[in-house]
Amino acid sequence: MLQIFYDSQDFFLLKELEKSGPKKGVISQSVKDVIQSLVDDDLVFKDKIGTSVYFWSLPSTAGNQLRNVNSRLESDLKSSKKRHAELVEQCNALKKGREDSDERDEALADLKAIELKYNELKDEMAQYADNDPAAFEAMKKAIEVAHTAANRWTDNIFTVRQWCSNNFPQAKEQLENLYNEIGITEDFDYIEMTPAPLSSVFD
């Protein structure tokens, strides 16, 4: 497609390029995409004049573009070489003191043994978590909170029962049946909490 421009050094409409494309081995259906790719690469220029869009390119345009690309690639290569040298230097610095030796192998073996022992102790401590005084104290406080909340709701239930009795005395039997159905029986009462001795917790 570039050769079409170079041979004529003229301006073309897209329709004209679609007719000339097959002569250069480019099927007409793909000419539009090829031209757009060349425009994106700054190898072909386009401009709108009136209602028509014209495309053009000169041999010097490709030369300038290739020189720009070559300059950019050389700059990238120089930066990459510099970065590579820095990484090699860092790698060599990290290797210092880590050379293979009997002392290093022995130190690594000791470290591995320590890690295994640490994991064993950690697992053993987890088994005694239930007997941890701090855990017991937290559980004790949680029980106290639950006990207070339960009795608070019990008090609320008694208040509602009294209110229903005062306002609906004629429905006493129906209310009693309702209470029994939802579990509020004659033995329904406040919960008493008896502290358990510590010895029973840690046994």
Image (cartoon, rainbow, N blue to C red):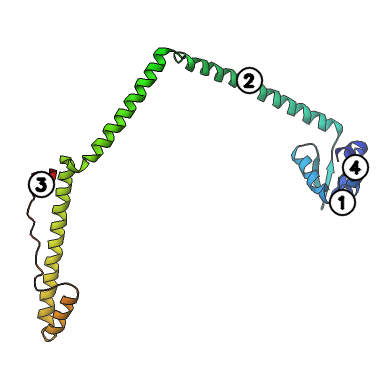
| Residue 15: mark in rendering | 1
* Up/down of 78 relative to 154, above or below: above
The span from disc 1 to disc 3 (Cα, nearest Å) is 96 Å
Measure how far apart labels 3 and 4 are at the Cα level.
96 Å
> Is residue 47 placed above or below 188 in the rendered structure?
above
Q: Is residue 49 visible?
A: no
| 63 shown above or below 145 | above
Secondary structure type for disc 4:
helix
Q: Nearer the viewer, residue 18 or 192?
A: 192
Image quarter of residue 164? bottom left
Q: Nearer the viewer, mark 1 or mark 3?
A: 3
The amino acid marked with disc number 3 is Ser
Identify the element where label 1 is drawn.
helix
Question: Quick check: 22 left or right of 170?
Answer: right
Q: Secondary structure at mark 3?
A: helix
Q: Are marks 3 and 4 in contact (CB under 8 Å)?
A: no
Indicate which disc, 4 or 2, sits on the residue closer to the N terminus: 4
Say the numbered circle drawn on residue 81.
2
Q: Residues within 10 Å of mark 4 (few under 14, many from 20)?
A: few
Mark 3 or 4, closer to the camera: 3
Would you call the spot at circle 2 few (<14 residues within 10 Å), some (14-19), or many (20 or more)?
A: few
Q: Which mark is residue 77?
A: none
Q: Is tag 3's residue or tag 2's residue first in the polypeptide sequence? A: 2
Mark number displayed over residue 24: 4
Task: Report the residue at 32% width, 25% height from top.
Answer: 114
